[in-house]
Amino acid sequence: MRVYLVESFRQFIKLKCARLASREDIFLFKAVTEREADLSDMRVLAESGLNWEIIKRECQKQSLSTGILWENALYQKLLDLKSKYGIKSPLEKQLKKIAEEKMAEIAILEEIKKGNTTVKTISTSLKLSELFIRQSLEKMEKKGLIKVDKSTRPYKLTLK
């Protein structure tokens, strides 16, 4: 039965007239859902050939427009795809880095909201190195997410 379903799905994605969304869009949507069959469907799509850059760009667009960390969901599914089917994506390392940076930003913003306004207090609370926190804060300041008051020692952090 399962082989039939996989073959049926392969036939479906070959139908040009039935496409309402690209294979890349379908792959991305399956990456952020939890249906058991989605990983198998993702395998079929990956084996049929995908434009990984389109998937990455759409993933980032969806993250921006929804406020949901799509990069992490996609990264996790790519790990599952590699583990279960041996399919490697060229996006894996990029998505890991993006997801880690965004998760760090979210955690740091939460710490600032709690009143932890120095590198040391944030580092202690999150159990991350001060160097990592400083690097993250520098990127966040450039993005306009935070303001760093450098007129005080230690520097004070506030939300923008």
Image: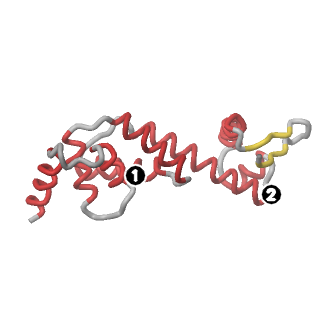
- Left or right position of 42 against 68: left
Name the foreground residue: 84 vs 35.
35
Q: Is label 2 in a helix, a strand or a loop? A: loop
Q: Crowding at label 1, few (<14), some or many (≥20) Cα neighbours within 10 Å?
A: some
The residue depicted at 14 percent of the width and 49 percent of the height is 10
Residue 59, numbered label: none
Taking the spot 39% from the left edge, 56% from the top edge, the residue there is 32
Mark 2 to mark 1: distance in Å? 32 Å
Which three-letter amino acid code belongs to the residue tagged 1? Gln
Q: Secondary structure at mark 1?
A: helix
Q: Residue at x 34, y 47 (%)?
A: 78
Q: Position of residue 35 (x, y in %)?
A: 31, 64
Q: Give the image quarter of residue 95.
A: top left
Viewer-closest of 44 and 93: 44
Colour scheme in use: secondary structure
Left or right placement of residue 128 versus residue 65 in this view: right
Count of marks, rendered view: 2
Q: Is label 2 in contact with label 1 (beta carbons under 8 Å)?
A: no
The N terminus, quarter of image: bottom left
Amino acid identity at mark 2: Gly
Q: Mark 2: give few (<14), some (14-19) or many (20+) Cα within 10 Å.
A: few
Q: Which residue is mark 1?
A: 76
Q: Is residue 76 left or right of residue 106?
A: left
Which of 49/79 is in front? 49
Percent from the top left, x then y, of residue 38?
Answer: 28, 58
Question: Closer to the N terminus: mark 2 or mark 1?
Answer: 1
Q: Residue 130: percent from the left, percent from the top?
A: 71, 42
The residue at the point 27 percent across, 55 percent down is 39
> x%, y% of residue 49?
22, 37
Eyeballing the image, is 115 above or below 59? below
Label 2: which residue?
Answer: 115
